[in-house]
Amino acid sequence: MTTRTLPWTPPPAVDVEALPAGKWWDAVRAAPVVGERALTTLGDKTGAVIQDQGGTFYWLVAVGSATSWNLRQVRVLTRLTDERTYLGVPPASWTKGPKTHWRVPLGPNRYLTHPWKLWEALAEADRAEYGRRPKGRQLCYHCQLPTDEPIPIEVKKRGMTVSMYACPNHAPLYPTVQHPRTLTSATAAEHEGRR
């Protein structure tokens, strides 16, 4: 979504400031691996994007436009009935990392991201990084608790590599499953930048 004048601008500050989500915008948080791929997919269609020092991405979207999303490694920060959610917003001049910064700077023609374009980019990144989502809940290999966001991982058991699932908190502890490519998926591999 492009606008000529901004209804909101980051407050003049010398450091990151916690601002409430759900007032001027909602924020869509994506893990680094998913966020990087989605940002590449969106290209010039993205609005302003904050990237924190851990690499996590935050897109600003219209309030209430992303509340029903359910993607792995993606969260929507918004105002809830009984609590507030805050986002660390850097000064507008911070456009370089490694600290929290504007990965895509805020500007008159770059403010909110269109929610459905963002959802499509994030859903494509989710499928590309983690494969098809299994139906139903799965047990996390690490903590043995059910998860609604199962991420395929590889585990060594008795000298063999076995594909299992992990929850988003424990998935980074294990290598992810690499799906072998067939001749019919060469176009997809080329699109994803893989051999």
Image: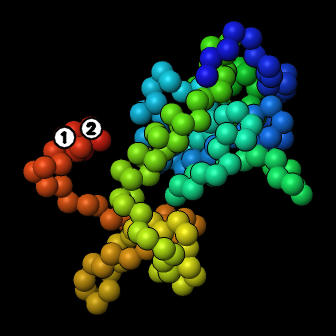
Q: Nearer the viewer, residue 174 or 149?
A: 149
Measured as percent of width and height from the top left, residue 86 is found at: 80, 45
Q: Residue lying furthest bottom in this view?
A: 158
Residue drawn at point x = 82 percent, y = 52 percent: 80
Residue drawn at point x = 39 percent, y = 53 percent: 127
Residue 46 badge: none
Q: Is residue 188 visible?
A: yes
Residue 187 badge: 1
Q: Does 193 appear above or below 138?
A: above
Q: Are marks 1 and 2 in contact (CB under 8 Å)?
A: yes
Q: Residue lying furthest top in this view?
A: 4
Name the residue beneath numbered marker 2: 191
Measured as percent of width and height from the top left, residue 89 is found at: 75, 34
- Is residue 164 rendered to the left or right of residue 114? left
Residue drawn at point x = 16 percent, y = 45 percent: 186
CA gap, disc 1 to disc 2?
Answer: 6 Å
Measured as percent of width and height from the top left, residue 138 is found at: 48, 77
- Is residue 15 rendered to the left or right of residue 127? right
Element at badge 2? helix
Name which residue type carries label 1.
Thr
Q: Does 47 appear above or below 56?
A: above
